[in-house]
Image: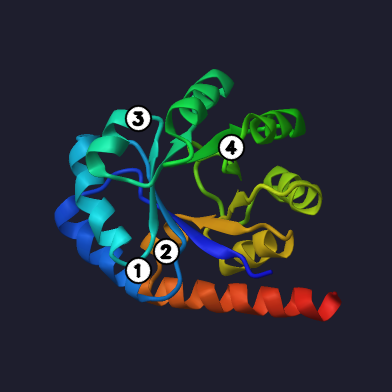
């Protein structure tokens, strides 16, 4: 199995500067999803980004706000507000929309989200400053989940290419990246191209071990 990229917007989006960056990233290679994180004027940002991503067959996810999701015509909701909010979203939005579970810190929380019917579980903390490498706990949870459970998992990588390879090596379905793309010295398009090559190599290595 080959993992796919799950892009996360920067903490602050200036639309005039970011729209060309997003276009470049999506033209750089395969991207499965775009998670738009809370911003000032969140509605405007989501409405601007959603159709551009969807035009490239990229699923767009909004954090916690189903009204913003609906008005922007996004594809789903990333629930970071806890189990009660996750259950409410699943009941209200599935099967028409994707509902993913974020802020998963333990195996128990992951299993509860899976049993509730989450379309994916996300390992990694979006509110923490990014480091070069993926957090060890993220890798451990992702490897455990990928081996035992059917619902897809998303692992948050760090800023380095090696961190993307490490996440993919766990068997995760998706590898989430943020500043590894937007802050790449050669630009977002080159970043997505390079990270897809990393995922290709990781899949080849896994196939060789099988």
**Tag nearer the camera, 1 or 3:** 3
Q: Residues at badges 4 and 2 in contact (C-beta under 8 Å)? A: no
Which residue is disc 1 drawn over?
25
Q: Distance of mark 1 from mark 4, alpha carbons?
A: 28 Å
Q: Nearer the viewer, mark 2 or mark 1?
A: 1
Position of 194 relative to 103 (above/below): below
Quarter containing the C terminus = bottom right
Q: Is residue 186 visible?
A: no
Q: CA distance from mark 4 to mark 2?
A: 27 Å
Residue at the (63%, 51%) spot, across then down:
152
Q: Residue 101 sits in which quadrant? A: top right
**Alpha carbons under labels 1 and 3: distance apart:** 25 Å
Number of callouts in the render? Answer: 4
Q: Classify mark 3: residues with Cα within 10 Å, few (<14), some (14-19) or many (20+).
A: some
Check the image and name the residue furthest to the left: 16
Q: Position of residue 69 (x, y in %)?
A: 31, 37
Upstream in sequence: badge 1 or badge 4: 1
Give yes or no for contact between labels 3 and 2 (Cβ–Cβ under 8 Å): no
Residue drawn where x is 44% and y is 27% of the image: 92
Q: Residue 110: which disc?
A: none
Q: Give the mark toward the camera: 1 or 4.
A: 4
Mark 3 or mark 4, whichever is nearer to me: 4
First-in-chain label (4 vs 2): 4
């Amino acid at each position: 199995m080959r993992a796919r990229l799950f892009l996360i917007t920067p903490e602050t989006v200036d639309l005039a500067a970011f729209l060309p960056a997003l276009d470049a990233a999506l033209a750089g290679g395969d991207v499965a999803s775009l998670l738009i994180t809370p911003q000032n004027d969140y509605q405007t940002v989501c409405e601007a980004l959603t159709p551009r991503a969807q035009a490239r067959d990229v699923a767009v996810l909004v954090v916690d706000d189903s009204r913003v999701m609906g008005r922007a015509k996004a594809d789903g909701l990333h629930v970071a507000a806890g189990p009660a909010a996750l259950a409410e979203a699943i009941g209200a939005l599935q099967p028409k929309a994707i509902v993913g579970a974020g802020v998963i810190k333990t195996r128990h929380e992951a299993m509860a989200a899976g049993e509730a019917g989450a379309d994916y579980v996300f390992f990694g903390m979006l509110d923490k400053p990014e480091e070069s490498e993926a957090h060890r706990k993220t890798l451990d949870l992702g490897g455990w989940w990928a081996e035992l459970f059917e619902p897809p998992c998303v692992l948050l990588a760090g800023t380095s290419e090696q961190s993307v390879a490490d996440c993919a090596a766990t068997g995760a379905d998706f590898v989430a990246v943020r500043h590894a793309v937007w802050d790449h010295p050669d630009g977002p398009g080159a970043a997505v191209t390079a990270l897809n090559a990393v995922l290709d190599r990781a899949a080849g290595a896994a196939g060789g071990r099988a």
